[in-house]
């Protein structure tokens, strides 16, 4: 307030209240601070960015066998689309918690991994490994997804084409 700020816009993550991951818990705690700040505020929760998903898949593709968490789906969204939504929200009046923003498709991690491998020209066997624990249960249950808010337009394959030049589509 002392700096003349009257509207605070914060980007958070879909699932911060459903997946007990430490980073998610921190994002939720920051949401609460924003809500209690006394400023006008807007919070937008988005699904995982294409860049993050591709980066994680790149790390998982380093060993000779690509090990993936069994039963997990994701809904990657284009960071520029989220940025555009945030800019529009910042230009408007404080709106509180606005509807979540998800990518256009909910897909299994294996499907995303195979698209990544095709786009990057890598060849790896893919093995789905069941993982235990509350965090992976939250992911398996889709706590980080927003299928009813699939408003992003750029697909993961379109992102991969732009980043790597390969289509990520089957031959």
Image (tube, rainbow, N blue to C red):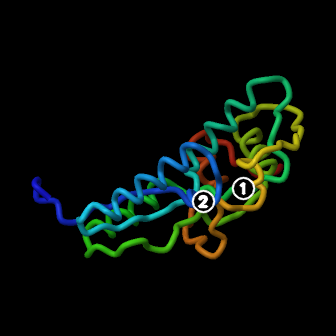
SS for dot 2 = loop
Tell me the residue at 74%/49% (across/down): 134
Q: Is residue 35 left or right of residue 40?
A: right
Residue 139, image x, y percentages: 72, 54
State which quarter of the image contains the N terminus.
bottom left
Tell me the residue at 83%/42% (across/down): 131
Tell me the residue at 76%/61% (across/down): 141
Tell me the residue at 75%/34% (across/down): 121
Q: Is residue 97 left or right of residue 160?
A: left
Residue 46, image x, y percentages: 52, 60
Any mark on residue 15, and which? Answer: 2
Q: Nearer the viewer, residue 72 or 112?
A: 72
Q: Residue furthest top?
A: 63
Q: Residue 125's quadrant in the figure?
A: top right
Residue 11, image x, y percentages: 42, 57
Q: How many marks?
A: 2
Q: Residue 2's quadrant in the figure?
A: bottom left
Q: Nearer the viewer, residue 48 or 167?
A: 48
SS for dot 1 = helix
Q: Mark 2 or mark 1: name the one nearer the start of the chain.
A: 2
Label 2 close to label 1 by CB (< 8 Å): yes
Q: Is residue 10 left or right of residue 5?
A: right
Q: Nearer the viewer, residue 83 or 114?
A: 83
Any mark on residue 138, and which? Answer: 1
């Amino acid at each position: 307030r002392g700096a003349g700020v009257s509207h605070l816009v914060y980007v958070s993550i879909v699932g911060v209240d459903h997946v007990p991951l430490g980073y998610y818990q921190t994002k939720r705690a920051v949401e609460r601070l924003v809500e209690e700040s006394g400023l006008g505020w807007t919070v937008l929760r988005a699904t995982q960015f294409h860049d993050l998903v591709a980066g994680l898949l790149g790390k998982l593709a380093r060993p000779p066998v690509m090990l993936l968490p069994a039963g997990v789906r994701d809904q990657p969204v284009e960071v520029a689309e989220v940025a555009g939504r945030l800019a529009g929200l910042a230009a408007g009046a404080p709106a509180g918690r606005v509807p979540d923003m998800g990518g256009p498709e909910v897909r299994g991690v294996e499907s995303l991994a195979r698209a990544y491998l095709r786009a990057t020209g890598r060849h790896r066997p893919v093995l789905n490994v069941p993982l235990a624990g509350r965090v992976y249960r939250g992911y398996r249950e889709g706590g980080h997804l927003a299928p009813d808010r699939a408003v992003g337009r750029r697909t993961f394959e379109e992102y991969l084409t732009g980043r790597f030049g390969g289509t990520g589509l089957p031959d």
